Amino acid sequence: MAVLEQPVNNGNPFADVVGDGLAPAGTYVATVLDVKDEFGVTRQKYQSTEMETVDLTCFLFGFRDAAGQPHRVASKRMRISGNEKATLFSFLKSLLGRAPAYGWDYCAVKGQKCLLTVEHIQRRDGVGVFAAIAALSPVPVGMAVGQAVAQAAVAVPAAPVPVVVAPAAVPAAPVAVNVDADDPIPF
């Protein structure tokens, strides 16, 4: 006798935000836009027919390509676990550049910049590809400033600007850049 069972949701919680557009492959300075936790999700155990109830989390990243077009990429869903061998632990370690502290709320990474490498992976059904996160790392200190200055140069029309030399002891103020004033996307 065949029993019709309700399908298990294997979809990404950010699928509607990411949309159908394919993010370009490459390495970009990205921003963690959101973190979504799902509690009490029923799914099939790995290499088993048994079902289990787990808590999952997923991260959404946003970046702009060389042409200034915004793109979003979501991580895969990961089991919420502090085990050093867990996918989430490795993911956070790559994102932070160090092991996360126990008891720390990983939702605090919202708004943080990182280097994100996007790759295109063939779908399991063989029809098309999707953008996936291949690697993560913290943004090198000198690169973050260079990125803001490069974006400021693109956003500001060329005009003669007087050069002011500041004393070496005074740190430079961070540069806040908005590529397009009409664009509501914060990355």
Image: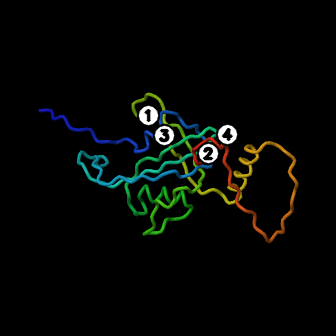
User: Where residue 107 sits in the image (x, y, percent)?
Assistant: 46, 59
Mark 1 and mark 3: span between their CA atoms?
A: 16 Å
**Residue at 55% of width from left, 37% of height from top?**
23
Helix, strand or loop status at disc 1: loop
The answer to whether 155 is drawn above or below residue 98 in the figure is above
Q: Amino acid at mark 2?
A: Thr
Q: Nearer the viewer, residue 97 or 174?
A: 174
Q: Quadrant of residue 81?
A: bottom left
Residue of label 2: 27
* Mark 2–mark 3 CB contact (< 8 Å): no
User: Where residue 8 sits in the image (x, y, percent)?
Assistant: 28, 41
User: Where residue 150 sits in the image (x, y, percent)?
Assistant: 74, 48
Q: Amino acid at mark 3?
A: Val
Mark 1 and mark 4: span between their CA atoms?
A: 26 Å
Residue of label 3: 18
Q: Nearer the viewer, residue 124 or 67?
A: 67
The answer to which of marks 4 and 2 sits earlier in the sequence is 2
The answer to which of marks 1 and 3 sits earlier in the sequence is 3
Q: Nearer the viewer, residue 170 or 83?
A: 170
Mark 4 and mark 3: span between their CA atoms?
A: 19 Å
Q: Amino acid at mark 4?
A: Ala
Residue of label 1: 123
Q: Quadrant of residue 112?
A: bottom right
Which label number is shown at residue 66?
Answer: 4
User: In screen coordinates, is 103 left or right of 66?
Assistant: left
